[in-house]
Amino acid sequence: MKEKKVLRIGLIGGGFMGRTHSNGYKRVGDFFPELEYRPELKAVCSRREDKVQAFANQWGYQSFETDWKRVIERDDIDAIDICTPNNMHAEIAIAASEAGKMILCEKPLSRTLAEGKQMVDAVEKAGVKNTVWYNYRRLPAVTLAKQIIDSGKLGRIFHYRANFLQDWTINANLPQGGEGLWRLDVDAAGSGVTGDLLAHCIDAAIWMNGSIKDVSAVTETFIKERMHQETGQMQKVGIDDACIFHCHFENGSLGLFESTRYARGHKALYTFEINGEHASIRWDLHDLNKLEFFDHADDSIVRGWRTIHVTDSDQPYMNKWWVPGLSIGYEHSFVHQVADFLKSLETGEPCAPTFKDALETQKVCEAVIESGASRSWKEVGKVGK
Ligand code: SOE
């Protein structure tokens, strides 16, 4: 068998996302054997030595570091995978670009549009390969939705609707800052549900339905003060706990988006629905292998919503897994992203979403936050100008 080329990975951040990405690197070779490249888990980095050592042992990293700058300096590493809280993304990405490393950055690209622009400039100046982990794009049913839209089956699109609902921050005693809970600290996260959850919905929406022109948002912070893990003091909460916005897309369709972490009973209810002139599509993360499709061209006596179980070998990614009818899960979206990144090394094509693509999502997020704060419509193209 032909010897594979190696992509040596330095993972920075050993939390939940570090685990999802590591699983992607570990599984990809078994299921995408035709790829010319294979990832090698060279080093993982996190500040606490005991934790990072345990992570390295558990996931099979060859070494560990406690200072991310060391990972970037190492010449036995080709690609930096950024899985830190959002406030580290820009600094690490810029340093990694300057060191000529490829970068795979966890979403959202950055805390702010200004930071995101610096990151795009850095990767473009250095000419380094880059991608952002908007993983849900790579679930087979979501990729199929994109293919159906691109085929023109929906015709003119009128509506794009998406939700991302959770309930894990309702408890007022939950502190802000620290592991996982940095998402509640505006300095670490940049924003609340807008950057953390709606960013997924916006990424998919732009990918499937084109650019968003303008937005009008309502944002709310339900718990105004929380104890900060680092200071031990009660501090103002600066994130949006909930966000609802509507928008115009450049193609003339209307968008409606909602996200909250205060929807009791919902853990990760990400849904979207797209209504076109001839057909509609809807999808629900809780039943992620299924895509619902309504085609007005069907014979009227049998016309209705049909459920496509996206597990057949001619459907996106599914020839890599089991046999038709057998489902895959959330973690496979990360395996697919690694596979697509490795493939892009062979072809020389960008691996979407690149930093530049993800900057579009960042612009919409910024417009949404500004619109919520000012209670006015914001044109996405004018944000940050
Ligand atoms: C937050 O709860 C979170 O883990 C996000 O950070 C992820 O991006 C999302 O996929 C699931 O929810």
Image (tube, rainbow, N blue to C red):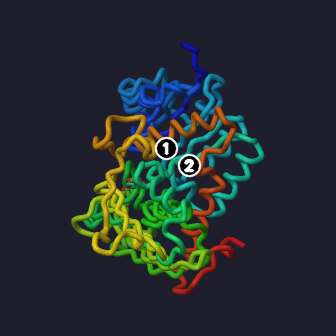
- Could you tell me which residue is drawn at 63 percent across and 52 percent down? 355
Q: Which disc is residue 132 wearing?
A: 2
Residue closer to the observer: 38 or 267:
38
Q: Residue at x 42, y 49 (%)?
A: 139
Q: Relative to 124, is 241 on the left or the right?
A: left
Three-letter residue code for mark 2 = Val
**Where does label 1 land, which residue?**
83
Tell me which corner region of the image, top left, top right, bottom left or bottom right, holds residue 206. Answer: bottom right
In the displayed orientation, state which residue is furthest to the bottom: 376
- Name of the residue lying farthest toward the right: 125
| Figure quadrant of the C terminus | bottom right
The vertical placement of 343 against 288, above or below, is above
Q: Secondary structure at mark 1?
A: loop
Q: Nearer the viewer, mark 2 or mark 1?
A: 2
Q: Where residue 116 appears, x then y in whole percent? A: 64, 57
Q: CA distance from mark 2 to mark 1?
A: 11 Å
Is ligand 1 within 8 Å of the beta carbon of the residue shown at mark 2?
no
Closest to the observer, 232 or 157: 157
**Is residue 80 at all visible to an observer of this figure?**
yes
Residue 255 in the image, given as x and y percentages of width and height: 49, 76
Horizontal relation, residue 82 to residue 24: left or right: right
| Quadrant (top left, top right, bottom left, bottom right) of the N terminus | top right
Q: Position of residue 99 (x, y in %)?
A: 71, 35
The image quadrant of residue 285 is bottom left
Regarding residue 162, the answer to whether it shows in the image is no
Q: Which mark is residue 13?
A: none
Amino acid at the residue labelled 1? Cys
Residue located at (56% from left, 49% from top): 132
The image quadrant where one finds ligand 1 is: bottom left
